[in-house]
Amino acid sequence: MKRVKRRYLALKLDSDGLPTGKEFIDAVWSAVTKLYGEHGASLTSLSLINYDGEKKTAVIRTSLATLNMVRASIATITSVADKEAAVHITAVSGTIKALNKKTQ
Amino acid sequence: MKRVFADLHLRLNVKDVAATLRMASKAGALGYSLVGVPLAPETRAEEVERLRTVCREAGMDFVSRVDLRPRSQTDLTRQLRRLRRKFEVICVSCESKEVARQAAKDRRVDLLSFPLLDFRRRFFDRAEAELARNGLAALEVGIKPLLALEGPARVRLLSYLRRETAIAKNYGVPVVISSGASQELLLRKPREMAALGFLFGLDEVSGLDSVSRSPFALVKRNREKLDARFVAPGIRVVKEGRDC
């Protein structure tokens, strides 16, 4: 079976609220589902790798094939946990190690 | 070469200097180096200069822009005659076919925009694209409604935008993506704007061009034209005096 290529995205939350990791990833899932439907969302293999509530940063993982879909969906997020918000992608990389280097 | 990015449509309250500075700083932090702000046609030159200074403080280049909503073809030409030399970018909101066609063929018009929710008045078809290509006008796509709308309205808007950008691409009409943001939280990074372009059929390079190359080319062309040394396209005064 062919190995699935993945991409790690470093995200920065811009919001007055202090959402939990679950609320944050729910907002990402909801944006993907709204734009691409349940079938499209199932192709993304999204998962939350790391979330820092204080710094308001997160790392998520997605498949390379759906990277553009996830990028577009993240750009459409306007609220997280019922608070106005924007989520910005600060870096994209193929490994967590390289991602950490980029975000340092 | 490293790309530089522009957002030609930031909705600012120009009277509020602090908010303007905040918004311009935020745009700078997100990676833009040029912002366009729509101003009222009667805005004085001093006010424009004040805004330019505020944006310069935030490390941004400022472009003055006016949005016209003419009722007829004659009204459009009259407004263009009056305002062309006053603003660096002129955008025409095409609310009738007559206005859309005239705006597309008039070389004084830089950006064409269409009503976002009234789909029957989106007149960007092949004829419009042909005229726009010859008239050097670009199609402006604002991303604000893509963020604000949900469900069937957004589906319909995306479908129209996909059709229009495909026509624009076929006819070589530049597409300019702008934010139309009135609040900081509605601003997106240039690459995120390009990613939103992916939703209506722009590939990565075209998406990035629509927030960098296309708006910069448009501004550069207009600044050349507004320069005192400009005579005609390709002709400019290099030296004046008896020994020329």
Image: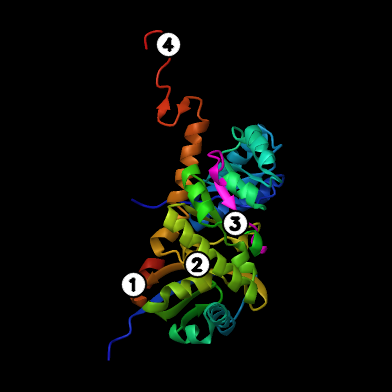
Q: Which residue is mark 1?
A: A98
**Residue furthest left in the image:** A1
Label 3 and label 4: CA atoms lie apart by 50 Å
Q: In x, y percent, where is residue A75?
A: 53, 69
- Which-is-in-front pick, marks 2 and 1? 2
**Residue projecting furthest to the top:** B242
As measured in the structure, the alpha-carbon distance from the residue carrying label 2 to the one carrying label 1 is: 31 Å
Amino acid type of the residue that numbered disc 3 sits on in the rendered structure: Phe
Element under disc 1: helix
Name which quarter of the figure residue B234 lies in: top left
Residue A34 vs B126, above or below: the answer is below
Task: Report the chain holding disc 1.
Answer: A
Sequence-earlier tag: 2 or 3: 3
Location of mark 2 (residue): B200
* Mark 4 surroundings: few (<14), some (14-19) or many (≥20) residues within 10 A: few
- Pinpoint residue A11: horizontal percent, then vertical percent: 49, 71
Which tag is nearer the camera, tag 2 or tag 3?
3
Residue at image position (36%, 52%) is B2
Q: CA distance from mark 2 to mark 3?
A: 17 Å
Looking at the image, is mark 3 or mark 4 earlier in the sequence?
3
Give the percent coordinates (x, y) of residue B153. Answer: 64, 72
Which range is magenta?
B104-118
Residue B123 is labelled as 3
Closer to the observer: label 4 or label 1?
4
Residue A64: within the magenta?
no
Amino acid marked by disc 4: Gly
Does dot 2 land on a helix, a strand or a loop?
loop
* Quarter placement of the C terminus of chain B: top left
Q: Chain of mark 4?
A: B
> Which residue is the site of mark 4?
B241
Circle 4 or circle 2, nearest the eye: 2
Q: Determine the residue positioned at 40% across, 18% down.
A: B239
